[in-house]
Amino acid sequence: MLDTLSRKIRHFFHVVSNIRPIVWICLYVFLMPVFAFIYWGLPDTQFRIPDGAGTDYWSWLYYSIVTITTLGFGDYTPAHVWAQIVTAVEVMCGLVILGFFLNAVGSMKSEIDVESEIEKQKQAHFSMEKEKLMLCIPTIMHTLNTFLSYCYAVTTPLSKRNSDNAQYNPDFTFADMADLFKPSGLPFDNTRLPAVARLIKCSTHTSLNLDSLQNRIDLTLWPDVLENCFAFVANYQMFSSADSLSGQAIDLLKNATVSGTEAEKKLSAEIADFKGDPDIKKVDELQPVVELYFFIKDNAKRAIQIEQELTRLANE
């Protein structure tokens, strides 16, 4: 029973503490005219009233204010039981409300202090995570630039490639990928391997870096970066885990040779002769290149968006 009573009392004070101080002030002020109306309704004989003092409502409002604030000037005094009871009740109401008001002020201050501490912790966390992100930006930017350069090589015909201006074109067509088995021609690529093989290997490296970035840094602080990193990694995993005929052909793309096999030459010729937009639902020997087409379209866009966001953060 005592435990139940104790819980109820704690609950009561918890509820009271959550009432805003302004509510208690408004109630405090509201009681002044209410009690003044009660005093005004009592017979004047219930009080000792100074000679010449008024007995209208405004005089009793003055008495109510003096009473509830416990000033007690002594000019108006309760002389009989009903006046004494009402006066005592008003005094007690004033004291209780002031107590609740002070308690609410203390509760609000504690709440403000807690919120301030939480905000400080958030700021400290943000600063720490941003500092870690700033250290990672050069590596991530280099990885993304390399990825986009290989995207450019795969999606640009050999005759149009310019090693001095390897700018990826997001509006490339499927037929533009006909020379994907040719060397990239990029100044930093001295392997002479087919551009598509280098792109897929670079995609693996980029995906691992972005996945590591998500694990090491709280990217929820930068939702756009997190979304694009997650999408890039997910796209790569879906592309690299393709099965059946598509998977076998993707293996061909991964293991392409610089000299070119009959299968590679046939794929290149079919890509060059392709008209219109590719259909990812159509399963044939062009399917892996179609998947590669959509993989580049989406992940290159993600890489550009990550670059732009990281550049903005670095310049803040």
Image (spheres, rainbow, N blue to C red):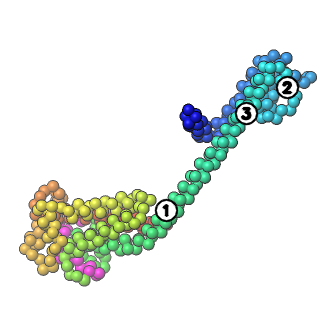
The residue carrying pointer 3 sits among few (fewer than 14), some (14 to 19) or many (20 or more) residues within 10 Å by Cα, namely: many
Residue type of the residue flagged with mark 2: Thr
Q: Quadrant of residue 195?
A: bottom left
Count of labels shown?
Answer: 3
Disc 3 residue type (three-letter): Gly
Q: Residue 68's spot in the image, x, y percent?
A: 76, 32
Front residue of this view, candidates 32 and 47: 47
The part of the chain drawn in magenta is 171-189
Q: Residue at point 24% right, 72% down?
A: 201
Circle 3 — which element? Answer: helix
Our reading of the magenta stretch's main secondary structure is loop
* Residue 252 point in image, percent of width and height: 14, 70
Tag 3 residue:
94
Q: Nearer the viewer, residue 24 or 143?
A: 24
Could you give the CA–CA distance between mark 3 and mark 1, rounded to whole angstroms? 47 Å
The residue identified by callout 1 is 126
Is residue 184 inside the magenta stretch? yes
The amino acid type found where label 1 is placed reads Phe
Residue at the image position 15 percent from the left and 74 percent from the top: 256
Q: What residue does disc 2 label?
A: 77
